[in-house]
Image: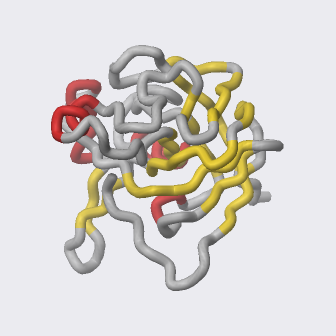
Amino acid sequence: MTDKRIYVTSVSSSDVHGFSKQNRDHIQLLTGLGVEGDAHMGVTVKHRSRVAVDPTQPNLRQVHLIHAELFDELTEKGFSVAAGDMGENIATRGIDLLSLPQRTRLHIGDEAIVEVTGLRNPCKQIDDFQKGLLHAVLDRDADGGLIRKAGIMSIVLRGGRVQRDDAIRVELPALPHIKLERV
């Protein structure tokens, strides 16, 4: 029987700006800030390349989510990628994160709510982690459009504790839906 649950498979954080994050028993999401103790936590942007352009821009990348199914796909292609390796805070299973529209709300566990802001734009650091991985997380659709498969970004609307096996409930925004773009 196929598991139809939508749930958290792992949580990760890091207090330093690096590529991978350490797996944790749980993480604490803080309203309007992100993951407690994570280097990317804050009201304004924390990603170094974006800070260099404009350090006052809002942080639309407070929480990085990635679908664990991507780890399965990458393993089949010969890569060795585990939870936390790609810098995500939350890995999920049972949901096509990439197809969600902007402003989708994900209710995670008993309290936390994050709002989807856009796609993670994979960068050269992915190839620094494992050669060829950048190409593996990019694809093309039938029309030749670029598909970024390295996860989605979100902001914290309501804080709370998040841990492995927490259920996720999807709340779609009102129509019309806006397709995710890179943030």
Residue at 53% x, 35% y is 33
Determine the residue positioned at 27% across, 33% down. 126
Identify the image quadrant of residue 146: bottom left
Please name whichever residue, 144 or 34, is drawn nearer the observer in this view of the structure: 34
* Image coordinates for residue 150, horizontal then vertical, percent: 38, 47
Query: Looking at the rendering, which quadrant does residue 94 occupy?
Result: bottom right
Q: Is any part of residue 132 visible from this angle? A: no
Q: Where is residue 34 shown, x and y percent of the image?
A: 54, 35
Position of 124 with respect to 92 (left or right) is left
* Quadrant of the image containing the N terminus: bottom right
Between 63 and 122, which is closer to the camera in this rendering? 63
Count of labels in the image: 0
Q: Is residue 178 visible?
A: yes
Residue found at the far top of this picture: 16
Residue under the point 61% across and 58% down? 95
Quadrant in the rendering for residue 170: bottom right
Vertical comparison of 22 with 45: above or below: above
Q: How is the image coloured?
A: secondary structure
Q: Residue at x 23, y 71 (%)?
A: 145
Q: Nearer the viewer, residue 129 or 106?
A: 106
**Outermost residue to the front:** 56
Compare residues 107 and 84 and report the one nearer the observer.
107
Residue situated furthest right in the rendering: 110
